[in-house]
Image (tube, grey):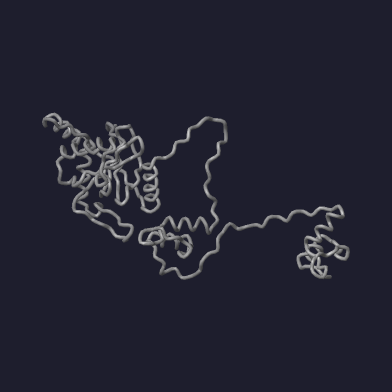
Amino acid sequence: MNATPHALRLSARLGVDLKKVHGSGRGERISVADLESAIVAAGGRVASPPPPVRSGKAPRSHTDDSQVPATPLARRLANKLGINLHDCRKSGSLGRVSRDDVLAAALLLDGLPQAGAPQATSATAFETLPMSSMRRAIAGRLQMSKQHAPHFRLTVDLDLDRLLALRKEINSEVPGVKISVNDMLVKACAMALIAVPDVNIQFDEATQSIRRFADADISVAVALPDGLITPIVRSANSRSISDISNEVHSLITKARAGMLKPEEFQGGTFSVSNLGMLGVRQFDAIINPPQGAILAIGAGEPER
């Protein structure tokens, strides 16, 4: 029978006698179109073929990727996810594959569903508020910190009687000075960091190394309408409590006015986050990268 292979297979599947079909091709060769036309002319109907099923996955590379320029974090993540670095774009510094490049490749290669916009499930009125650039930056940094910094938490109760007595004495006897409990805790943290220098550090992700500092630069968490910022009291270990108090007050004022310079909030070797004034007894704080530790301070309570 003079018919194309596709026409032969289709006729066998549909049970059509090709002897009754006139071919329009060279040498009256019967094509699929001829077969379908004959079926329609006889009063039948040809069902549309089902759409091809696609896996949604791009082909993977199997070439050795040991020489592909990539950040250490990106290389470790690629190894963990089974991603060949040849399949990644190179949007990082110096033309290297970055962490985000690896995640993008994993999304493409594994066919993971894209997160779409949430759909309203009821008629309840709501307002959509776009995230500010500050909130996006905070979310990205703290998410990365939670994913890549091994957090472990230690909780201790402290007797504040002597600290409160000293604060009362200083505020009553030194003119023009009004220090807070937080000011005193910043000073205490600075002295502790000098006593335990292995905590007074920063972690350098690019070189996988630890930087240990001679002075304690304490970041103080300050809440703003658009997010959170951590201005830094530099060399707090060598400053008096009154000097720390004045510096913290100045930094908070500048932060709320949006006048902080980058060097006044970038870096630091340790952070202090205090929610005690809001009545919070205890909370878990997230390490502020590139630092290695943070102190979460809750409210003081009379001893029971």
The number of numbered badges drawn on the structure is: 0
The residue that appears at 42% across and 69% down in the rendered structure is 66
Vertical placement of 214 versus 168: above or below?
Answer: below
The extreme right residue here reads 20
Query: Could you tell whether 216 is left or right of 204 in the image?
Result: left
Q: Quadrant location of the N terminus?
A: bottom right
Residue 108 lies left or right of residue 180; in this view the side is right
Can you tell which quarter of the image residue 70 is in?
bottom left
Pick the front one: 256 or 202 = 256
Residue 40 position, x and y percent, is 83, 54
Q: Residue at coordinates 21% horizontally, 34% vertically from top-left?
A: 180
Q: Percent position (x, y) of residue 228?
A: 33, 40
Question: Where's residue 253, x and y in %?
Answer: 25, 35
Look at the picture and state if 193 lies above or below 27: above
Identify the image quadrant of residue 72: bottom left
Residue for point 32% across, 32% down: 278
The image quarter containing residue 156 is top left
Q: In which quarter of the image is the C terminus?
A: top left
Residue 301: percent from the left, percent from the top?
A: 28, 32
